[in-house]
Image (tube, grey):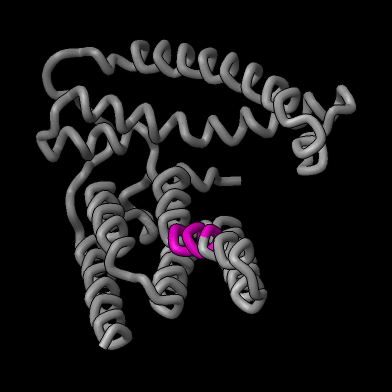
């Protein structure tokens, strides 16, 4: 069975997109976060991100994005129909999370289809400072580790018959915070040390331009993907201007 990550990392794969193009996509998504404010515009942004995730073969991530978006939208509409200031404040909070769902799709795309070495190589090709390159590359590798460590911590609490549930948090918030934060901090420190050691082994502190086995050059599919991202951003900007007017 062929490893999907290896296939995505191969420039010969039709699903492979240059990491520099994906960084442009991240920047455009960040700008759209301030431009798109309507529910319809957010749903269109999510739809484009679902298509992008399906293009990269990240079917599970696309399903998760659809599920989270649908759940947040349903809760937001439900709270909007309930009178009262508390319901209005809760609905506004849920809508803010709903507004950030396109960035969740961008997060899935960057963490699942771009390796830390690819990102470091792409940033070096952009002539960015070494400090920024190392920071972003290690952060990209560290973010998925957080989810794994949280899952391991929840399993440990469940084994000790202290499940991390909303009811337990409401009953004893300080105790649950102690049970959660202390193990997480210890795990994060250990993960940071392991990542730093792995980075040193790979020669990330070596001065000069680092070599790479991956041939990084822009191809037709990179420009086509970038054109689709720019076209979607322009459409969303026009859509929002019509909604405001």
Residue farthest front in this picture: 85
- Based on the displayed image, in which of its 4 quarters is residue 214 positioned? top left
Residue 196, image x and y in percent?
A: 40, 14
Residue drawn at x 39%, y 35% is: 140
| Quadrant in the picture for the C terminus | bottom left
Residue 23, image x and y in percent?
A: 26, 49
Would residue 153 be visible to someone looking at this image?
Answer: no
Q: Is residue 97 magenta?
A: yes
Residue 25, image x and y in percent?
A: 28, 57
Q: Main secondary structure of the magenta part?
A: helix
- Left or right of residue 82, residue 244 in this image: left
Residue drawn at x 87%, y 22% is: 160
Residue 13, image x and y in percent?
A: 37, 55
Query: Which residues are drawn in magenta?
Result: 93-100
Which of the two residues, 85 or 175, is positioned nearer the viewer here? Answer: 85
- Left or right of residue 187, residue 128 in this image: left
């Amino acid at each position: 069975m062929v490893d999907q990550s290896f296939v995505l990392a191969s420039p010969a794969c039709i699903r492979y997109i240059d990491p520099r193009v994906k960084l442009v996509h991240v920047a455009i998504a960040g700008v759209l976060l301030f431009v798109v404010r309507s529910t319809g515009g957010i749903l269109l942004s999510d739809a484009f991100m679902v298509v992008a995730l399906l293009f990269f073969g990240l079917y599970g991530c696309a399903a998760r994005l659809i599920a989270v978006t649908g759940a947040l939208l349903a809760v937001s509409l439900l709270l909007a129909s309930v009178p009262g200031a508390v319901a209005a404040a809760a609905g506004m909070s849920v809508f803010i999370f709903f507004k950030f769902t396109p960035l969740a799709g961008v997060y899935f795309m960057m963490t699942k289809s771009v390796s830390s070495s690819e990102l470091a190589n792409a940033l070096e090709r952009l002539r960015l400072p070494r400090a920024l390159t190392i920071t972003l590359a290690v952060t990209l590798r560290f973010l998925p580790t957080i989810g794994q460590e949280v899952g391991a911590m929840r399993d440990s609490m469940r084994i000790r018959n202290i499940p991390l549930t909303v009811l337990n948090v409401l009953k004893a918030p300080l105790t649950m915070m102690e049970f959660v934060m202390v193990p997480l901090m210890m795990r994060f420190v250990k993960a940071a040390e392991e990542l730093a050691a792995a980075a040193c082994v790979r020669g990330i502190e070596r001065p000069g331009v680092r070599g790479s086995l991956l041939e990084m050059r822009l191809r037709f599919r990179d420009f086509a993907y970038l054109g689709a991202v720019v076209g979607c951003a322009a459409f969303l900007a026009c859509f929002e201007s019509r909604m405001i007017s």
